[in-house]
Image (cartoon, grey):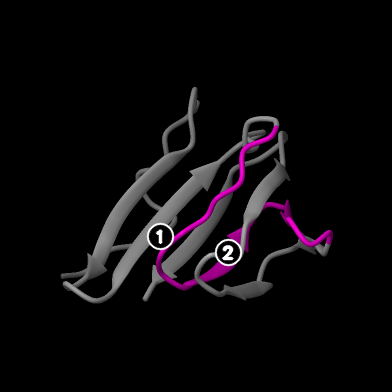
């Protein structure tokens, strides 16, 4: 399968776009597209799998429940361990933020 992470990006996004683009029964690979999106107030992701995420374009801020904060620019990545509660504080409202996430 061949694809391009920067193709077929919708012009407007009412909600974040999550697209599974690869993987198997043990690994899931997703392209996520955001623009001005954030986690709802008080919401924390609490995932059963590890997540390796890299920001490909745009800007974003990830906050851990522990208080750690990460301002992300293109090329920045996080390896988020399972059950490490985190949230998306904000994403760039002025342009598309494209993420590549690998759940393992």
Label placed on residue 5:
1
Q: Name the residue: 36% across, 76% down.
A: 104
Segment colored magenta: 42-67
Displayed quadrant of residue 64 = bottom right
Provide residue 103's location: percent of width, then percent of height: 39, 69
Whether pointer 2 and pointer 1 mark residues with C-beta atoms closer than 8 Å, the reply is yes
Q: Earlier in the sequence, mark 2 or mark 1?
A: 1
Q: Name the residue: 60% across, 65% down.
A: 84
Q: Residues within 10 Å of mark 2 (few under 14, many from 20)?
A: many
Provide residue 82's location: percent of width, then percent of height: 50, 70
Q: In this view, does 25 lie to the left or right of 19?
A: left
Spatial CA span between label 2 and label 1: 9 Å
Most extreme residue toward the top is 14
Q: In this view, does 69 lie to the left or right of 16?
A: right
Between 70 and 31, the one nearer to me in the picture? 70
Provide residue 10's location: percent of width, then percent of height: 42, 34
Q: Which element is circle 2 on?
A: strand
Which residue is label 2 attached to? 56
Q: How crowded is mark 1: few (under 14 residues within 10 Å), some or many (20 or more)?
A: some
Q: Name the residue: 23% across, 76% down.
A: 26
Q: In this view, does 102 lie to the left or right of 25?
A: right
Displayed quadrant of residue 75 = bottom right
Between 25 and 17, the one nearer to me in the picture? 25
In the image, residue 38 sits, relative to residue 57, either above or below, namely above
Q: Name the residue: 15% across, 70% down.
A: 1
Q: Which element is circle 1 on?
A: loop
Between 84 and 31, the one nearer to me in the picture? 84
Q: Is residue 97 left or right of residue 49?
A: right
Confirm whether the magenta stretch covers residue 52: yes
Confirm whether the magenta stretch covers residue 17: no
């Amino acid at each position: 399968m061949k694809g391009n992470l920067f193709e077929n990006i919708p012009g407007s996004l009412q909600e974040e776009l999550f697209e599974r683009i690869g993987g198997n029964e043990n690994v899931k690979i997703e392209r996520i597209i955001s623009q001005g999106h954030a986690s709802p107030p008080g919401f924390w992701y609490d995932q059963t799998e590890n997540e390796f995420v890299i920001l490909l374009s745009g800007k974003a801020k990830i906050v851990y429940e522990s208080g750690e904060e990460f301002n992300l620019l293109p090329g920045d990545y996080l390896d988020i361990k399972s059950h490490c509660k985190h949230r998306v504080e904000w994403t760039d409202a002025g342009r598309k933020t494209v993420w590549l996430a690998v759940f393992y």
